[in-house]
Image: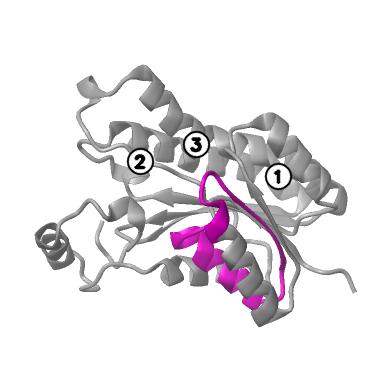
């Protein structure tokens, strides 16, 4: 019986780490990437392999590095699931942002989706099966002051998801995105307790989301049985916030 496989980018911590855990729990062999936190990723690999008896290979490089990405995909015979999770933010006025900082956000959050899909899709088409899940943000839906580049990149991810879904649906490949609200990750660690409390008051679910909330939804999107009819959706996961 063919083993299920998944690639998760940005998997050393936070949402990506939680997704890796959920997929390993479901029996997927994993390919995990991170940019800088190699020691954390290796620790996660050992725990996942020992806990769930799956195979896990790790890679540490910028997901925007096409040469390294091509070498990674040379190690992957096939993929059942691709999760584009790698992302960074920039909080500050647009006028104080350099072009290099803008480009880094766009490349990491959006261009990386293009690159991973470019290499993953041909084999998915050959096998006539596959799922691509892009981790987006509610700011890609409505925009956020002081986070123009991040909002633009995630809006791009949403449009990318809808367009690629139409392109690949005839090949039985489902492309969807999860637009996350406020999730308890390092990316939001700049918020003070007071700011968090004020935001929680705006969230009908009365709490900040957990990485595991996102992971569980990823698991549902990958689950069996699956009709293959959920295609091109940007699913908002924000406790009713927006």
Residue 130 left/right relative to 11:
right
Q: Which residues are magenta?
A: 12-40
Query: Is the residue 11 above or below the residue 224 in the image?
Result: above
Under circle 3, the secondary element is helix
Q: Residue at x 15, y 57 (%)?
A: 192
Q: Which residue is mark 2?
A: 89
Under circle 1, the secondary element is helix
Q: Nearer the viewer, mark 3 or mark 1?
A: 3
Q: Position of residue 36 (x, y in %)?
A: 52, 45
Please say if the residues under marks 3 and 1 sit with CB atoms less than 8 Å apart.
Answer: no
Q: How much space separates mark 3 and mark 1, taking CA atoms?
A: 23 Å
Q: How much space separates mark 1 and mark 2, taking CA atoms?
A: 29 Å
- Is residue 225 visible in the rendered image? The answer is no
Under circle 2, the secondary element is loop
Closer to the chain start, of discs 3 and 1, is 3
- Is residue 59 visible in the rendered image? The answer is yes
Q: Residue furthest right?
A: 1
Mark 1: give few (<14), some (14-19) or many (20+) Cα within 10 Å: many
Q: Residue at x 41, y 42 (%)?
A: 88
Q: Position of residue 98 (x, y in %)?
A: 32, 20
Q: Nearer the viewer, residue 136 or 34?
A: 34
Q: Which residue is mark 1?
A: 168
As drawn, the label of residue 108 is 3
Q: Position of residue 235 (x, y in %)?
A: 45, 58
As drawn, the label of residue 46 is none
Image quarter in which the C terminus is found = bottom left
Q: How much space separates mark 2 and mark 3, taking CA atoms?
A: 9 Å
Q: Nearer the viewer, residue 61 or 137?
A: 61
Q: Position of residue 56 (x, y in %)?
A: 71, 64
């Amino acid at each position: 019986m063919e083993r299920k496989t998944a690639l998760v980018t940005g998997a050393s911590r936070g949402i990506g780490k939680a997704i890796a855990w959920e997929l390993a729990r479901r029996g997927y062999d994993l390919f995990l990437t991170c940019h800088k936190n190699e020691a954390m990723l290796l620790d996660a690999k050992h725990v996942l392999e020992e806990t769930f008896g799956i195979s896990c290979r790790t890679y540490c490089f910028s997901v925007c590095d096409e040469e390294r990405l091509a070498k990674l995909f040379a190690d992957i015979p096939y993929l059942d699931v691709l999760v584009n999770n790698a992302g960074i933010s920039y909080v500050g006025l647009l006028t104080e942002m350099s072009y290099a900082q803008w480009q880094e956000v766009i490349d990491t959050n959006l261009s990386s989706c293009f690159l991973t899909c470019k290499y993953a899709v041909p084999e998915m088409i050959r096998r006539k099966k596959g799922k691509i899940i892009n981790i987006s943000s509610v700011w890609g839906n409505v925009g956020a002051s002081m986070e123009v580049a991040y909002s633009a990149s995630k809006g791009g991810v949403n449009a990318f998801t809808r367009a690629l879904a139409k392109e690949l649906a005839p090949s039985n490949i489902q492309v969807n995105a999860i637009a996350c609200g406020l999730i308890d990750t390092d990316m939001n660690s700049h918020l003070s307790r007071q700011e968090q409390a004020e935001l929680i008051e705006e969230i009908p679910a009365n709490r900040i989301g957990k990485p595991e909330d996102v992971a569980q939804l990823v698991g549902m999107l990958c689950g069996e049985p699956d009709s293959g009819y959920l295609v091109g959706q940007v699913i908002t996961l924000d406790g009713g916030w927006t």
